[in-house]
Amino acid sequence: MTTVSDLPISILMCILSRLSVKDLYSCRRVCKSWLALVSDPYFAKLHHSVAPTGILVPNLLLRHMRFIEFFESSSSSEHNRNILKFKTSSNFYSDPSSLKNLKHTNSCNGLLCFYEFGECFYICNPIINEYVRIPQAISGSFVLIDFGFGFSSVNNQYKVIRYLCPGNLLDYSLLQVEIYTLGEDSRRSLGIGIVPPSFSNIYRQKGPFLTGALHYLLATTDGFFESICCFDFVNESFRFVPSPSHFGDDHKYPITQMRFSVLSNCLCIGLYLYSEPEPRFDVWMMADYGVKGSWTKVITITEGIDIHIPYHPLRLFDNGEIFMSVQGPKGKTVLVSFDPTTTIFNLVQTCKRKRDFFYSFCGPIPFVPSLVSLKEVVGEQHFKNLERGRRMTIRENGLGRRVSEEEAKLKKAIQHVV
């Protein structure tokens, strides 16, 4: 009889890579050989390449983060989910009273980047509870306007892009672009005035990292949508991306009514309209990246739309159900799902308490989990500053569940698959 130990490592890796993060935590505790396998850098990249998109929810004070992962169930047509709670390091940022100065940018390959103004960057992988501080002060003659995080697949390097402006002028036409490469500890200026003209507009909206580039929605000086541009981390240059033909001169939309995101690995724009005969929320998707004609409207919601509330698409399922974050009064944010077959909004529970809202300084984030260690990202020099979170708890479908209870079942299940 063939057992798990008889399988070639490549096949075993392929099987384990299809498991959820919750089950992989169980695998790490089965035996030392499985711990070594799951911790292998190659396995981490393999798992990330097939992992489904979940939703990451940092809490207000960044004391912990919740990750909602989705998985299919053969016994139910519903989307089952695990909720994993990670407690962050107590030294995640230097001064808790300075949280208002801690800013978050986009996620990239399962990693997050934060910046504490005047102090340092923080690169973190919440799934394996690793956090690294990278000192990176800014010259006193410059002011940080914005920053982003990306990856170059050509040389396998993570990079932080910073937009700086002379502090004594605050002239956005003099915007200077800098690149900091993780692992090399190098900072280079790409020059002044290399951004698209509308990039300096205050209505600019930063979007997702996709296909090697960080995307932005640009607007006119009066706040109407103008174009889509992106910064390519491979070529280290800006370029434009085709926008929907419907967003032309005949249809001018305020950029404040738009939300930029990635759904089903495609660039998407959520647009809520309250000037129509009836309020509605549309989602436009670029099915074939870079092809203007591939923009199509995939979702239209008219039932239950509140004209005073922005909707941010986070996760789209094959059956058309969509998860979104909705920001209400007093900074409260809720996760909701909309089912097109029933045309009903439902609240999504994110914690044990009965309340369904949460406070978050950066909002929920569409997030593909990664097991890659930060040692592979920041290099030896900064890895010595590594901090780890204290513990992790898991809930499945809203119910408490110990990881250890699943170990025997998991090993038996994998043997059955073989």
Image: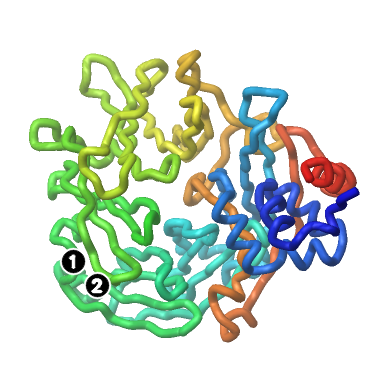
Q: Secondary structure at mark 1?
A: helix
Which of the colour schemes (rainbow, by chain, secondary structure, one colour) is used?
A: rainbow
Q: Residue at x 58, y 49 (%)?
A: 51
Q: Position of residue 162 (x, y in %)?
A: 34, 70
Identity, as a three-letter code, of the amino acid under mark 1: Tyr
Identity, as a three-letter code, of the amino acid under mark 2: Cys
**Among numbered discs 2 and 1, the one appearing first in the sequence:** 2
Q: Secondary structure at mark 2?
A: strand
How many numbered marks does the figure carry? Answer: 2
Q: Position of residue 6 (x, y in %)?
A: 84, 58
Q: Where is residue 392, by image quadrant?
A: bottom right
Residue identified by numbered label 2: 165
Q: Specify few, some or many for label 1: CA neighbours under 10 Å numbering under 14, 14-19, or 20 or more.
A: some
The vertical placement of 381 against 197, above or below, is: below
Location of the C terminus (image quadrant): top right
Q: Which mark is residue 172?
A: 1
Q: Residue at x 43, y 70 (%)?
A: 117
